[in-house]
Amino acid sequence: MNSGGVQRRLRWRDDLAQVVEAEIIPRLMLAHRSERPVRRFPARLSGADDIGRLGALLLLPEDRDVLAEIRGLIADGMSLEEVLTGLLAPTARHIGRLWEEDLCDFVQVTTAMARLRRLVHDLETLSLDPHPVDPASRRVLLVPAPGETHTFGLTLAAHFFAEAGWEVTTSFDPHLADALERLRTEWFDVIGLALSCDVCLDRLVAAVPVLRRASRNRDLQVIVGGPAFHGRPDRIRLAGADAVVDDARDAPGIVQSLLDLRIRAC
């Protein structure tokens, strides 16, 4: 295979993962807001066999009831979170690698993506929580930095904020126009920006004061996270942020501490 073909396949592999990371997982995680029941058996984790089986089902020429497979895994103890982060995203990458290695063709990959989208719709229907969000809950707006294309960590943060009782809004507009409009017209306690690489750091630095000025909340807290900030505490000040989040699971606790400090200072 020539270098051009390799590059096209690498881009397709990344696109497959981004279908899951930027579109599928955000919708499902934000829909699944109900409290999890207490498990009385060990949590079921996905493995290579699950990923290989799901990938094979998605690549078959005929339709199979993939949703039934997923529901079976959930019945065996696999959480929705594990389905999202431990199964769907790795399966998308697995299919991309198969194509890269000439083990499946373009038509199969395209069909698999369409089936992933349909699976999303079906899972979303099963996961919808009929209970309204507490109107007294605090609100967080989560966005990728301008120009950022990787949103997986951001979507995990959205999930953990929702589990902690926050009302979560995500915006994936790469130019922040949607985020700016929301800040002008809605109330948010916090905005979080994710950045994976140094290329877009200057754009994030320039965007933070613009976002603060646009906000109805004059005390808007700004948090940043992502690989671009790992091991670089100096970049918190450079970005004009109030805190950095290294692990998405810690985001709600870090932000709550910031807000508590503001309350005590008043």
Image (cartoon, rainbow, N blue to C red):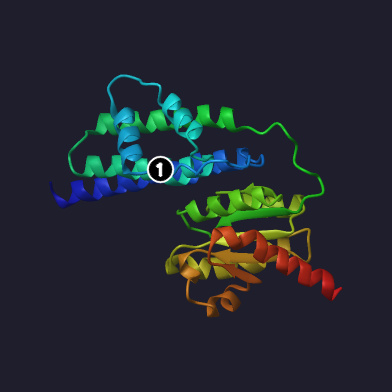
Q: Is residue 2 visible?
A: yes
| Residue placed furthest toward the right | 266
Q: Is residue 130 above or below residue 65?
A: below
Residue visible at 22% across and 44% down?
Answer: 100
Q: Could you say which is closer to the camera, residue 185 or residue 85?
A: 85
| Residue placed furthest toward the front | 40
Residue visible at 27% across and 22% down?
Answer: 61
Position in image of residue 163 (x %, y %): 65, 48
Characterize the local packing of mark 1: few (<14), some (14-19) or many (20 or more) Cα atoms within 10 angstroms.
some
Q: Is residue 151 visible?
A: no
| Residue placed furthest toward the top | 62
> Residue 261 falls in which quadrant of the image?
bottom right
Residue visible at 67% across and 34% down?
Answer: 129
Whether residue 125 sits left or right of residue 185 in the image: it is: left
> Residue 55 falls in which quadrant of the image?
top left
Residue visible at 78% across and 44% down?
Answer: 134
Whether residue 143 sits left or right of residue 90 in the image: it is: right
| Three-letter amino acid code at the position of disc 1 | Ser
Whether residue 102 sits left or right of residue 162 in the image: it is: left
Q: Could you say which is closer to the camera, residue 125 or residue 102?
A: 125
Tell me the residue that label 1 is attached to.
46
Position in image of residue 116 (x %, y %): 41, 32
Q: Could you say which is closer to the camera, residue 247 or residue 75?
A: 75
The quadrant of the rendering that contains the C terminus is bottom right
Position in image of residue 86 (x %, y %): 43, 46
Regarding mark 1 in the picture, which secondary structure is present there?
Answer: loop
Position in image of residue 20 (x %, y %): 44, 42
Q: Could you say which is closer to the camera, residue 79 or residue 161?
A: 79
Q: Is residue 54 above or below residue 206?
A: above
| Residue placed furthest toward the bottom | 234
